[in-house]
Image (cartoon, rainbow, N blue to C red):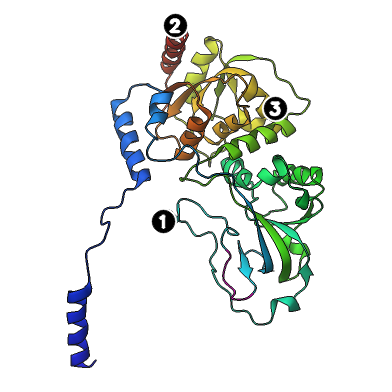
Amino acid sequence: MNEQLQADSELAAASWLRDPLNPDPFDPLAEWFRIHAEIAAAAQPIRLPKLLGKLDGLYPDEWTAEPQLLEYRDVLWLPDRGCLFHGGNGRALPWTAFSRFPRQRQLPQQSIHRIELSRPVPSFPRLEQALWLPRVNGAVFGEWLTEVLAFLWPLLLKSPQELVGLPVLLGDADSEDPLLAVLHRLMRAQHLTPLLNHHLPAALHLERVLVPQPSLRLHAGTSSVWWRSAVALGDQLAAGVEAEPVDKLYLSRSALPDDRRRIPGEAELELALEASGWMIWHPQQQPLQVQVAALRAARVIAGFHGAAWHGLGWIDPEAPKPRLLVLGDRPSLDLMLQLRLQRFEGWYVPCQEATAGQAELLESLLADAAASE
């Protein structure tokens, strides 16, 4: 390389480069982990509102204002790409791709962010109108109750008239997904028609497509729209199903498959709880409508945190809320943001495993709560 070019570049770099404006950016997730590590190290029960209050200043109560139903025109759809593409420049369109976490902490959900258009978009088979749902896969129950539900508010809340009768493109649908049947019922209630990828051509021109903004994003926040959607979903799932009031309900993980997180010592804890009058309950063994009814009927809910706890979103804001006793080493941030939004009372018990002695601890925490009322 030319020596003078090297010298000029070195001099320019020394002259023009400046220090970062913000060399140590604040990371709310790292701060939350630090706070939680202190709580875990103390190894003492902490009141749930006090724990959830530590999220204040790190994450807003409402992640987003009212999400909007966005409209795009002359869009290109390709199967299994996770997004829609601009019909003119081939770039992935904002909000048509499912994404996780704040923008500076993304996990890419599609490998292609731009395509080379080999022919004009109007030359492809077309849909005059459609609704696009980027995320519908229910393979992981916790993701279905959070990320998938985040896009379903147009189907669950007051549905815009312009949606009625539209075909629906299902971004990552798996026809073997049992929870896809729930989505199908929601679509039929709105006179919407599903379109699975294997029934479509290799490329599709969408003359007009509507895309809902999500009402929740992982590690970023949740919203009242998500909660209202969860309540509406629960109402539809539990229609005609009633549960007897349950005084003390323990959400067990002991019957989960071997590839899921199991809690050492949980069987011993469950025996001790049963002796104290607790109902030991395995959510994954119950139909969804029974899960909704049971969570709504419980006065106290305890257990090691997991996906089933997101079902607390089914509880109406105007209904009595159960008192929670959450055990575990580090509950998910997204569950904590949800519990803060819903203003639950109760206790968090930091621990890595279960013991029979925890049954007495849980009873004493309930007694303290009753005495303070």
Along the line of sight, the residue nearer the viewer: 12 or 321: 12
Residue 288: quarter of image: top right
The residue tagged with tag 2: helix, strand or loop? helix
**At 27% from the left edge and 59% from the top edge, which residue is drawn?**
21
Name the mark nearer the viewer: 3 or 1.
Answer: 1
112 on left or right of 37: right
Q: Are marks 3 and 1 in contact (CB under 8 Å)?
A: no
Expressed as whole percent of the image width and height from the top left, the position of residue 284 reads 63, 33
Q: Are marks 2 and 3 in contact (CB under 8 Å)?
A: no
Q: Are marks 1 and 2 in contact (CB under 8 Å)?
A: no
**At 63% from the left edge and 30% from the top edge, which residue is drawn?**
314
Along the line of sight, the residue nearer the viewer: 182 or 187: 187
Q: Which residue is mark 3?
A: 290
Q: Which residue is mark 2?
A: 371
Which circle marks residue 294 in the picture?
none
The three-letter amino acid code for the residue at tag 2 is Ala
The residue tagged with tag 3: helix, strand or loop? helix
The residue tagged with tag 1: helix, strand or loop? helix
* Inter-mark Cα distance, 2 to 3: 32 Å
* Inter-mark Cα distance, 3 to 1: 39 Å
Along the line of sight, the residue nearer the viewer: 108 or 330: 108
Q: Which residue is mark 1?
A: 104
Closer to the chain start, of discs 1 and 2, is 1
Is residue 305 at least partly visible in the picture? no
Q: The magenta stretch spans which residues? A: 88-93
Expressed as whole percent of the image width and height from the top left, the position of residue 124 reads 75, 75
Is residue 24 at least partly visible in the picture? yes
Residue 70: quarter of image: bottom right
